[in-house]
Image: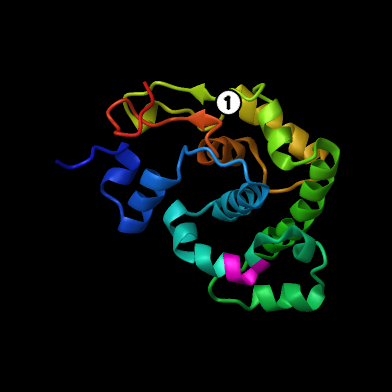
Amino acid sequence: MTKKRCFWAENWTKLEKKYHDEEWCEINKDDKYLFEMLVLEGAQAGLSWRTILERRENYRASFDNFDIDKIINYDNKKIEELLNNPWIIRNKLKIKSVIKNAMAFKKIQEEYWNFSNYIWAFTDNKQIINSYNHYSEMPASSDLSKKISKDLKRCWMSFVWEVIIYSYLQAIWIIVDHEKSCFKYKK
């Protein structure tokens, strides 16, 4: 018997199906993972998620496995190296945002003990479980994603617009948007 997935993942590549089945809308409160997903969601702006998933391992290698302590010390030489790396998205603003966001992420960690505490505090550590029949019913953003986006910008992050943050919240399981017919739907 074949598993029924959310429509967006049903007819896509094995990589996308694996992401849907094993990672999307699955809880992960590890700060390194939370930073990785924030970087990848920002990199995805204007592109397809498939493009980012196909480059994910290269992002990990290129950005020191998303070690923020290393990233905050990147210099112009490292930025040039990243701009010439054909295996990641070579957008100067996106690359510089990773460094800028690592600095802000570290400050948030220091204030809240970790980033997970910060991001989950917006919902009092509760998930938002939506109930959609089809992905076309899902919003691109929400009041929550707008609120978090505004706060992250206040913390000097970039590439954290409300649509990116909505997708981020789905990725880290704060917002659960599996379709009702999906085997991952939480009843």
Q: Is residue 19 left or right of 107 when viewed as pictured?
A: left
| Residue closest to the eye, 181 or 95 | 181
Can you tell which quarter of the image residue 70 is in? bottom right
Q: Can residue 33 be spotted in the picture?
A: yes
SS of the residue under disc 1 = loop
Q: Is residue 2 above or below residue 87?
A: above
Q: Residue at x 59, y 49 (%)?
A: 37
Residue sitting at the far left: 1
- Quadrant of the snapshot with the N terminus: top left
| Residue closest to the eye, 115 or 11 | 115
Q: Can residue 89 be spotted in the picture?
A: no
Q: Residue at x 39, y 32 (%)?
A: 178
Residue 148, image x, y percentages: 69, 32
- Quadrant of the snapshot with the C terminus: top left
Q: Is residue 61 left or right of 148 when viewed as pictured?
A: left
Residue 8, image x, y percentages: 34, 42
Q: Is residue 187 left or right of 2 when viewed as pictured?
A: right
Residue 26, image x, y percentages: 48, 39
Check if residue 61 falls in the magenta segment: yes
Point out the stretch of residues depicted in magenta.
60-64
Q: Is residue 131 above or below residue 154?
A: above
Check if residue 93 falls in the magenta segment: no
Q: Is residue 159 above or below residue 97?
A: above
Q: Main secondary structure of the magenta part?
A: helix
The amino acid sitting under disc 1 is Ser
| Residue closest to the eye, 110 or 99 | 110
| Residue closest to the eye, 179 or 121 | 121
Residue 47, image x, y percentages: 50, 54
Question: How crowded is the residue under tag 1: few (<14 C-alpha within 10 Å), some, or many (20+)?
Answer: some
Residue wearing tag 1: 142
Q: Residue at x 63, y 64 (%)?
A: 65
Count every numbered label the image shows and give the total.
Answer: 1
